[in-house]
Amino acid sequence: MTSHPAGTGGSAASGHVRLPVYEGLVRELGDVLAETREVAERTERLMRQVLPVRPHTRPAPAPAPR
């Protein structure tokens, strides 16, 4: 089964909805949604290496002014 653009779903009978205009654009211009997803995943992996996520903790209270 192929992935569908957001909001198009699939047919219960065949498991696939034909979207000729979308399919034509994918053939002509490439699958922008898949490429965007891949770039986002690569960027997320890189950012996790550069800026490791730390568990959320409360900051220490600021000292009272004297």
Image: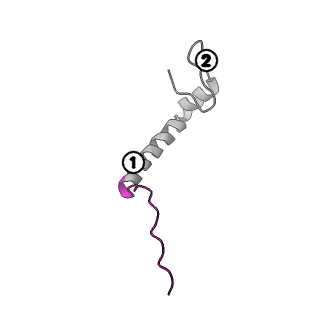
Amino acid carrying mark 1 in the image: Arg
Residue 54 on the magenta span: yes
Q: Earlier in the sequence, mark 2 or mark 1?
A: 2
- For disc 1, the marked residue is 45
Q: Main secondary structure of the magenta part?
A: loop
Q: Residue at point 41% right, 46% down?
A: 42
The residue located at (61%, 29%) in the rendering is 22
x%, y% of residue 66? 50, 87
Amino acid tagged 2: Ser
- Label number found at residue 54: none
Of 63 and 52, nearer the camera is 63
The numbered dot on residue 11 is 2
Q: Residue furthest bottom?
A: 66
Q: Is residue 25 above or below residue 55?
A: above
Reply above or below: 41 against 2. Answer: below
Marks 2 and 1, how far apart at CA: 34 Å
Q: Residues within 10 Å of mark 2 (few under 14, many from 20)?
A: few
Category of crowding for the residue at label 1, using alpha-carbon neighbours closer than 10 angstroms: few (below 14), some (14–19), many (at least 20): few
Indicate the colouring scheme: one colour
- The image shows residue 57 at horizontal and vertical percentages of 44, 60
* Region in magenta: 49-66
Report the residue that reaches farthest toward the left: 49
